[in-house]
Amino acid sequence: MKTLRDELKAITALLAIQQSGGTLTKKQLAEIKAGFARIAKLRRRGQTGKHSGPSGKKPRPPKAPRSKPVKAPSLPQRVLLDADLIDAVLRNREPSDLKKLIRQGADVDARGNDGYTPLVCAAHNGYEETARILLAAGASPNLQDDDGNAPLVHAVEEQHPEITALLIAHGADVNLPGKYGQSPLHCAAGGGDDKSAELLLAAGAHPNPQNEQGITPLHYAATEGHPEIAALLIAHRGDVNMRDEDGCPPLHCAVGAGQAEIVSMLLAAGAKLDATDNGGDTPLAYCNDAKIRRMLGKHEKQGQKGIAEILQRQRQLGSLRPKGPSL
């Protein structure tokens, strides 16, 4: 069986290829990952590759004098420290353990599986104290994982408003889109997290971002039935007539989902009842709810009545105007 020292040498050799500008093959990347797994196993067993003393106990390393500065860890040591830090975050270890690893040289922006940084792991799992420690140590609040999701997207998606507030306070970009163009506000609206939605909008989040399908947060709130968030978005100038890639404004979504309260809200905010999607269908074509159908019909009659009154007033004004001399 290889010793810890052997495994470190093998990993260092592969990492040296990458540092010199070379590209590692999938097999080499897999070997690095497997090497880390073997190292973790060896460390649990206590096989360090060094000989034990006469009593069978491993000799204690001499303490470094306090007057000497701590040396920067070597590449293999740094790789192990980074892996240990990510593992400590995932296991929600004690703050003292995290701070110790950081003092020893662990990179607070190190990447693990799927490009997850320690801060992404903390935000995703709701570990507020851990997130505070990492941010205080200089962790980037906007570093994205392999899918393009920053810690803020993870915090909002998993509904951890306290971490959302913490990240915003440390400069997280509230408009930075993630996978499929989903902004943090999309995640809050789709998940019904009104607290995070309030925090994001108060911090300057755009109320009308569109993802890759042209969907806005208001589309999500209308479809998923979150009237509090729909009202919040409308109050922050959410566009009630913005269309997605299928030509549907939020009213089509609310009608199709049977969300009567949101339908009423959108109509009051100026949603167009005669708007058509890419197939030429109005919201009424999406309606399967008798209550909403009556609501749409009543709104249409009121609109027609309002138009008739406007035309009548225009005719009255026209008849009162003085006529000029005929030519």
Image (cartoon, rainbow, N blue to C red):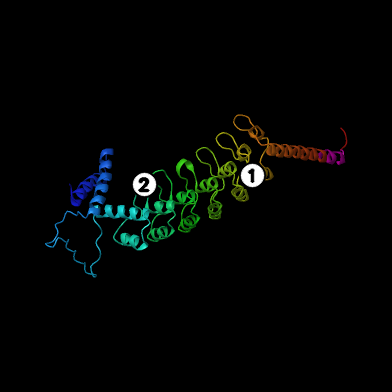
Which residue is located at x 43 percent, y 52 percent?
Answer: 125
Q: Position of residue 183 (x, y in %)?
A: 50, 46
Which residue is located at x 56 percent, y 37 percent?
Answer: 244
Residue sitting farthest toward the left? 54
Q: Position of residue 300 (x, y in %)?
A: 73, 37
Q: Position of residue 132 (x, y in %)?
A: 42, 60
Q: Is residue 319 magenta?
A: yes
- In the figure, 269 relative to 127: above or below? above
Q: Kindly identify which residue carries mark 1.
A: 262
Q: Kindly identify which residue carries mark 2.
A: 115
Pick the quarter of the image with the C terminus: top right
The span picked out in magenta is: 314-323
Residue 32: quadrant of the picture: top left
Residue sitting farthest toward the top? 279
Q: In terms of sequence position, does the residue under pointer 1 or pointer 2 come before the other?
A: 2
Question: What kind of residue is marked 1?
Answer: Ile
